[in-house]
Image (cartoon, rainbow, N blue to C red):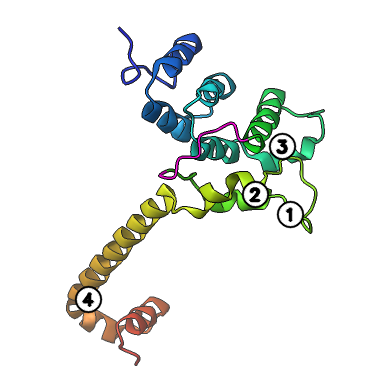
Amino acid sequence: MTTFETFDWESGDTDTAIALVREGTTRQINQLGRFYNWDYAPVEVLGAVLDRPDCSLGTALTIFVAAEPGYYEAFAPDGAGCPSPQIFAFLVRLRDRINAGDFVDDPEDSPEHPWLLTRYLSSEDGPERMFTLDPARVSGALSRPSRDAARQEDGHVFELHSALDLFATMRATQAGIEVELDARRGPLARLFRRLFGRNR
């Protein structure tokens, strides 16, 4: 029997995917909405996620920005000439639902990549845009720390440790190539001297 966990979300039948979304837990559908591969029937499957009454505002905003509204604004106001009219219509409907307050604003939840959403917030002095979001509806979700920011911070810590490890390894090998450096005067030798404080 196919379950939410065992289903192949990248090559499985779309009808089965939609049925599983309708039966999935709140956590399952919100995770799916955030990390779904847009190469596989996104309008149908993500539409089913968004139609769930427990779909969070954070998930809806994540889907909104993943749909690349900036690209589709070029086909405003009616999508004429758009190569993906289904996604254009999907975005229009999603924008309207976000602005109508259709999604659960969970205080423990926030969208992925919130900084990408700020350009779509309406303002009196800002340009008129096709896919404008009402700040009153989304500002709470955007003001909370995002999961993405936490992951990014963890990633920066990992990168720092990796850089320090590399630096320590290079320092350890310095003694072994000093004789070689003294015999050379090329640009790489100058760079190595600059990195390790041998400015001669």
Q: Examine the structure image and report whether residue 117 is included in the region drawn in magenta.
A: no
User: Which of the two labelled residues, at mark 1 and mark 4, occupies the earlier sequence position?
Assistant: 1
Q: Which residue is mark 4?
A: 171
- Are discs 4 and 2 less than 8 Å apart at CB? no
What residue appears at the point 43 percent right and 26 percent down from the top-left corner?
A: 29
Which residue is painted at 66% across and 52% down in the image?
Answer: 119
As rendered, which of 172 and 17 lies closer to the eye? 17
Disc 3 versus disc 1: distance between alpha carbons? 20 Å
In the picture of the structure, the residue carrying the numbered disc 1 is 123
Residue annotated with mark 2: 135
Q: CA distance from mark 4 to mark 3?
A: 51 Å
- Disc 4 marks which amino acid? Arg
Magenta region: 101-108
Circle nearer the viewer, 3 or 2: 2
Neighbours of disc 2 within 10 Å: few (<14), some (14-19), many (20+): some
Q: Secondary structure at mark 1?
A: loop
Q: Tag 3 or tag 4, which sits nearer the N-term?
A: 3
How far across and how far down the image is residue 10, in percent?
44, 22
- Decide which of tag 4 and tag 2 comes sooner along the chain: 2
Q: Position of residue 153 (x, y in %)?
A: 37, 58
Label disc, if present, on residue 57 of the rendered structure: none
In this picture, is 34 found above or below 41? Answer: below
Residue 133 point in image, percent of width and height: 67, 44
State how many labels appear: 4
* Label 2 SS: helix
Quadrant occupied by the C terminus: bottom left
The Cα–Cα distance between marks 2 and 1, rounded to whole angstroms, is: 8 Å
Q: Which mark identifies residue 72? A: 3
Q: Is residue 84 left or right of residue 179?
A: right
Q: Amino acid at mark 1?
A: Ser
Cβ atoms under marks 2 and 1 closer than 8 Å: yes
Residue type of the residue flagged with mark 2:
Pro
